[in-house]
Image (cartoon, helix red, strand yellow):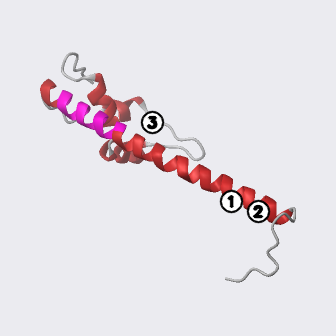
Amino acid sequence: MSTFKNQILGNYLFRFLQSSFANAYFETCAHGVTRFGLGKDSIGNITITLPSITEQNQIADFLNTQTVKIDSIIQKTHTPIRHLQEFRKAIVTAVVTGKIDVRNFSN
């Protein structure tokens, strides 16, 4: 196994290891029944696409920017969902405790 000091950026490597390619590779190398593990050789033998440092920076920056946008969208979606879940619980509680009469309710 050789090392690539000064040839690969940590942020790029981080994003590469999150890729579906790396995920599929590690899944095929994993062994175990209830707890999976990877051998040193499996980790050391993964083929890493190694563009120039400039390209690695561009790729990592792009993915970081898009991840921030996606995380923001997820957060904006979770807030209304939580409010709806709280509203649902309040309605169920009100019906169960008799504060709302649903016996004559029709669709």
Residue 60 falls inside the magenta stretch: yes
**Location of residue 40 in the rendering, given as x and y in whole percent from the top left corner:** 40, 29
Q: Nearer the viewer, residue 49 or 59?
A: 59
Q: Is residue 49 magenta?
A: no
Amino acid of disc 2: Val
Instruction: Check disc 3 and report its element: helix, strand or loop.
Output: loop
The numbered dot on residue 88 is: 1
Q: Callout 3 environment at 10 Å: few (<14), some (14 to 19), or many (20+)?
A: some
Q: Residues within 10 Å of mark 2 (few under 14, many from 20)?
A: some
At horizontal 22% and vertical 23% (from top left) the residue drawn is 8
Task: Identify the residue position indicated by label 3 in the image.
Answer: 38
- The amino acid at mark 3 is Leu
Q: Range of the magenta residues?
A: 56-68
SS assignment at label 1? helix
Left or right: residue 32 compared with residue 47: right
Residue at (54%, 46%) from the top-left corner? 79
Chain-order first, disc 2 or disc 3: 3
* Quarter holding residue 59: top left
- N-term mark: 3 or 1: 3
Task: Tell me the quarter of the image containing the N terminus.
Answer: top left
Location of mark 2 (residue): 92
Task: Inspect this view and state whether residue 6 appears.
Answer: yes
Q: Observer-nearest residue: 91 or 45?
A: 91
**In this view, 81 is above or below 105:** above
Q: Indicate which label's residue lies in the foreground, 3 or 1.
A: 1
**In the image, residue 73 above or below residue 13:** below
Image marks 2 and 1: residues in contact by CB distance under 8 Å:
yes
User: Is any atom of residue 18 visible in this view?
Assistant: no
Could you classify mark 1 by the number of other residues whose Cα lies within 10 Å: few (under 14), some (14-19), or many (20 or more)?
Answer: few
Count of numbered badges drawn on the protein = 3
In the rendered image, residue 76, in percent from the top left (x then y), is placed at: 46, 46
Q: Disc 3 and disc 1: Cα gap in Å?
A: 45 Å
